[in-house]
Structure formats: structure tokens, C-alpha cells
Image (cartoon, helix red, strand yellow):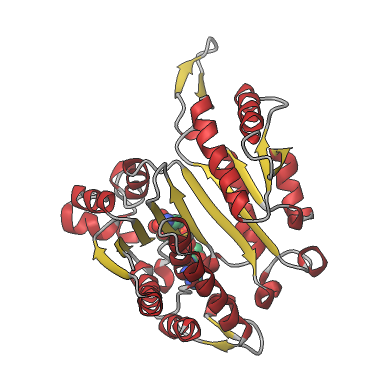
Amino acid sequence: MSTFNIAVLPGDGIGPEVMEQAIKVIRVIEEKTGNSFMLHEAKIGGCAIDAAGEPLPSQTLELCKKCDAVMLGAVGGPKWDTLPGNKRPEAGLLAIRAGLGLFANLRPAVIYDALKDASPLKQEIISGGVDIMVVRELTGGMYFGERGRVKTCDKGEAAFDTETYSELEVERIARLGFETAMKRSRKLMSVDKANVLESSRLWREVVIKLSAEYPEVELSHMYVDNAAMQLVRNPRQFDVIVTTNMFGDILSDEASMITGSIGMLPSASLGSGKAGLYEPIHGSAPDIAGQNKANPIATILSAAMMMRYSLGMEDAAKDIEAAVARVLEKGYRTGDIASFGCQVVGTAEMGTLICEEIK
Ligand code: NAD
């Protein structure tokens, strides 16, 4: 039996209420497996600004560095919207990713059978199920490259942003792509723009070179514009997608949209070690905070990802995911995914129903 230390950062808005449900699930897994989870709560985002004057207090970061994994709710809200960019709650998110050296973001986009009506795509396109994992590079490329403004000879201004990737940066994210594919159906799609961008040509070279170490994985390549189109034309052709920071930002949002609900989607951010940061993709939803209306499933599925990727507890991850599917099949829904004839439940009830299924 093992003991795991987990930093718990509920954050703002609906963060604490959805996190409470994920903790209930973690406690059920603890009972079922005999492993111990030591949970250490700390502040991030707006509540940290109120308590300590900054969105990521150094105590929070130090705690996270010592833990096996970090669970995060959501940050932000109207109360802090007028603060300057680097003082806002969301700055805490960038700081924690950088502070923990998390260079990869894994976002699954799954259409559950019971929720297929929620997808904006036609039934014939998604029938048979969609299950995509986007592996996005998180700390390089355009969002971190050199940028600036220069004066032009016509007395105007020009602006530039640069996309830079080193072999090392590409290799480590590509490796994670191959490793992820090995745990799934052994198909990897690398998305780039190698017909135009030099950084993409290097990306493709490195991915191809690395593929020699993974002969079991079927590797293919697609240009990003085509990938954006194919995701809505035939999403079932994709399994694992590995791509750059900017392309991944756009494609993972597109992939999540085809599932139909933001309240269902978890994510993991990983670095070179086993420790990772697990959070729902949604924000703090101030419009429904404190009303027992938020869907806790994205956070609960983030806990499942934590079991899989940081704690080596694949069976527990599958248990949680299967319990979520069964609760949905039985017709229970939070308001955001409600449809005709289903039974609408609150945040806490949904958490309890999933716990009962796991037991
Ligand atoms: P949001 O994701 O918070 O909400 C968008 C819409 O989806 C709202 O109508 C909300 O009620 C609904 N929604 C979101 N999560 C839900 C859930 N679990 N269950 C049911 N409904 C849900 O995005 P926003 O409104 O653009 O941003 C609100 C705040 O959150 C802002 O301060 C923003 O900066 C912040 N934000 C934080 C994160 C994060 O912490 N990772 C991500 C995005 C936005």
C-alpha cells in the first residue's frame, strides 16, 4: 500500500464546490484500494490575492513541488477583473505551470453515449463514439517566443511574434505523445504546418526520428488547417494528437466543443517527472457559483487522470470513468447537460451518485 501527497487548490467561484466532489471520490478510492491520500489544501487565484496579495503565494508553489500531484479547481471572477494582467488570478495559472516545469497539456475529448445529443455534430458523424486525446506543448512556441513592435518607414507600427522550437522541446513532447499512444490504440497524429513554417519542418523531422523508438505506434502527419477541418468532418479518425502550443490551444478547444459540454472535460499538465497538475478545462463560472448547480464531472475526471498519470493507479482511473458513464446512463444530469426526460441533480448529489457507483 502507498501513501500519496496531493496538493488541493480549490481556487475561486465554483472551484471549491466541484473540488469537494472530487475529494469525496478520492476518499472512496482510498477506502477501496487501501492506498492513503494525504490532502494538503492551499490557495491560488483570487482567494490568494485576498489572503496574501498575490495569485500564487510562494508557500503554495513550495507545497505543490513537494507533492505527488496537484488538483486545481478554477480561478478568477469579477472581483479581480480590474487588476493589471500580471496581478490577476489567471496569472497564478501561468506561474504554477512554469514553477512546476509542466511542458505538456493532455486534454481528452470524449463523447459519452448517453450525451451524444449534446454534441453539435450530426449523429451519423459521431455514432460509434469519439475519444480523442490532444497532447499540447505548453511552454514553447509562439506564446513564449520573442515578440515586439517596430516603427515602419511610413511612420506606422509593425508587430511580430516568433515561433521557436528546439529539438529538445519537440522531442520531449513527442515522446509523451508516443507514450500516450502506447497506452491507448497506438495511433499518433502529429499536427504541424510543415508546408510553410521552418519550425514545423524541424518538428516533423524530430517526430519522425523519434518514431524509430516506437515501432508499434502508427505515426501520421497532418497540416493544422486540415486537422481543424477533419475534426468536425470525421473526428473518429483521431486517437492521440500531438502538436505545438498554439495549434494545440486551438485544436483542443475545437475537440472539446464537439463533445458538447465544458463541464465534462478534464485536463492534465505534465513535466519530466511523474508529478502533474490536474484541473477541469472550465473556468470559475461566477454566474452559478455557490448555487449547487455546477457540474463536478470535469474535476472528478481530472482526479481519474491523476490516478492514471501521476499515481500509477490505472484501475482506479478506469473505475472512476466507468462510474461517471454509468451515472449518465441512468439518466442523472446537472443543469448544463440536462435534456428532456433526464433527472436533474445538483453538484453535491452528482458527486454522491458517482461515489456510490464506484463503491
Ligand atoms: P467559464 O468556463 O467559467 O464559464 C463559461 C460558461 O460555462 C458559464 O456560463 C458557466 O456557467 C458555464 N460553466 C463552466 N463550468 C461549468 C460547470 N462545471 N458546470 C456548469 N456550467 C459550467 O468561463 P468564463 O465565464 O469565460 O470565465 C469566468 C472566470 O473564470 C473568468 O474570471 C476567467 O478568467 C476564469 N477562467 C479560469 C480558468 C481556469 O481557472 N483554468 C479557465 C477559464 C476561465
Q: Is residue 47 left or right of residue 165?
A: left
Question: Which residue is rendered at x = 63% and y = 33% of the image?
Answer: 207
Say which of 342 and 307 sits in front.
307
Q: Is residue 289 visible?
A: no
Label tally: 0
Say which of 241 and 346 sits in front.
241
Q: Position of residue 341 (x, y in %)?
A: 65, 90
Q: Position of residue 24 (x, y in %)?
A: 37, 78
Say which of 217 and 85 sits in front.
217
Q: Is residue 264 left or right of residue 292?
A: right
Q: Position of residue 126 (x, y in %)?
A: 76, 65
- Say if 37 sits above or below 325 in the image: above
Q: Is residue 253 left or right of residue 215?
A: left
Say which of 37 and 287 sits in front.
37
Q: Position of residue 171 (x, y in %)?
A: 54, 32
Give the residue furthest to the front. 1
Q: Is residue 133 visible?
A: yes
Give the residue furthest to the top. 153
Q: Is residue 305 left or right of residue 14?
A: right
Dividing the picture into quarters, in which one does residue 117 lie?
bottom right
Question: Which residue is rendered at x = 28% and y = 53% of the image?
Answer: 64
The quarter of the image holding the N terminus is bottom left
Question: Which residue is rendered at x = 65% and y = 33% of the image?
Answer: 212
- Say if 255 sits above or below 138 in the image: below
